[in-house]
Image (cartoon, helix red, strand yellow):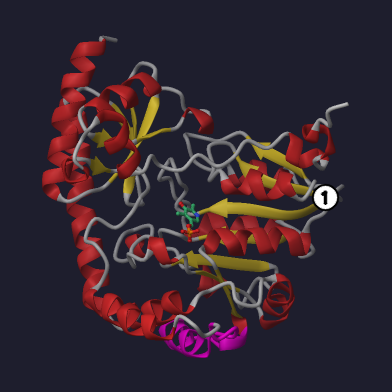
Amino acid sequence: MAVDYQTLAVEGVQSLTPYQPGKPVEELAREYGFRPDDIIKLASNENPLGPSPRALAAAREALENLCLYPDGNAFALKEALSRHLGLAPAQLTLGNGSNDVLEVIARCFAAPGSEVIYSQHAFAVYPLVTLAIGARGVEVPAKNWGHDLEAMADAVTERTRLLFVANPNNPTGTVAGEKAIRSLMDRVPERVVVVLDEAYCEYLAGTDDDVNGIGLLRDYPNLIVTRTFSKAWGLAALRVGYAVSSAAIANILNRVRQPFNVNTVAQVAATAVLSDLEYLERSREVNRQGLRQLEAGLTDLGLEWIPSAGNFVAVDVGRDGNEVFQGLLKEGVIVRPIGGYGMPSHLRVSVGLPEQNERFLKALKRVLSATGA
Ligand SMILES: *Cc1c(COP(=O)(O)O)cnc(C)c1O
């Protein structure tokens, strides 16, 4: 008798659908015979500037020591981060991308029988880490594409252990202000751990939405703020993210993470980029201008888009998004269809360099006129 491994997997895992990453450039090149250089990828919210030269130099130097295990406590990176953020190293938990940190948080605080709250149209990793540990995901309907924080607070029960808020959210780009976050925290009981995922917070600097979850930690001991080097800091390939929390929560998280979950090259590059504030400022500026460019171009095409606080914009193409996505692939342009997020007529487009944004807009115009509404 053949064994059906599907039925052997733990229950939560049976219902999982794998995370759908952006289509790699090399894959599209293979499939359609493009040269990789002729393809633009605006599909994974990557930094279009390329890495910081300072990070690159540090990473190159670290290659000499590939035979050695990383520093499991990441002393230098934690020191640099604690200076950058103005908090104690003991409040930090590092991860192989903040994705890793989100998973560690779920494993520390939820189990079969627990409920984990997140929003409709929220980042796909929350249901993934919830179901993988056999906990129950409670998806709260969104409001105007954003998190309905009041409804999320209402959804808390005796069984709730965790509540995820993406701020700004991916893929919608919506953001909640400090007042709304505070009133959520005021309503959620202290025994429920709230994760404020601030993967895009660097892009908020200087805007009206400039919320900083780290400033709320003092008032709310059940809060964990997660951040990443993958977006504005331009180190997505290296996988470095972190959680900021009370030292007591960090002590729990650090028990469960893998001892060497952040590799040496990642540690030194992340440490180096923290000193490259010029790179960060350029990332913000390119993003600000690129967003305006995309918004204006999409409006010219008669399309509705969701105002975004991130480095991407979700646009309603008024027809099957997957079809438009396929049409764009033939133009050598990779964006992200988000039907899996309950947004079948939207595409998520990452902000690129000005010429990339322009090329996307032109390709989209051609594809839309070929497919008809
Ligand atoms: C990109 C992203 C992350 C994290 O990415 P890592 O590369 O794993 O650090 C986390 N949350 C949201 C909402 C994101 O969009």
Q: Is residue 82 magenta?
A: yes
Q: Residue 136's x, y, as percent?
A: 78, 42
Which amino acid type is shown beneath numbered disc 1?
Answer: Ser
Q: Is residue 359 left or right of residue 314?
A: left
The answer to which of 265 and 344 lies nearer the viewer is 265
Q: Quadrant of residue 369?
A: top left
- Label 1: how many Cα within 10 Å (few below 14, some 14–19, many 20+): some
Classify 104 as above or below 121.
below
Magenta region: which residues?
70-90
Q: Residue 121's x, y, as percent?
A: 53, 37
Q: Is residue 115 left or right of residue 37?
A: right
In the rendered image, is residue 217 in sight?
A: yes
Q: Quadrant of residue 211?
A: bottom left
The answer to which of 201 and 143 lies nearer the viewer is 201
Magenta span: chief secondary structure: helix
The answer to which of 221 and 29 lies nearer the viewer is 29
Residue drawn 17% across the image and 46% down it: 37
Q: Residue 4's x, y, as percent?
A: 81, 30
- In this figure, which residue is indicated by the disc labeled 1? 114
Residue drawn 46% across the image and 68% down it: 212
Q: Dividing the image into 4 quarters, which one contains the C terminus?
A: top left
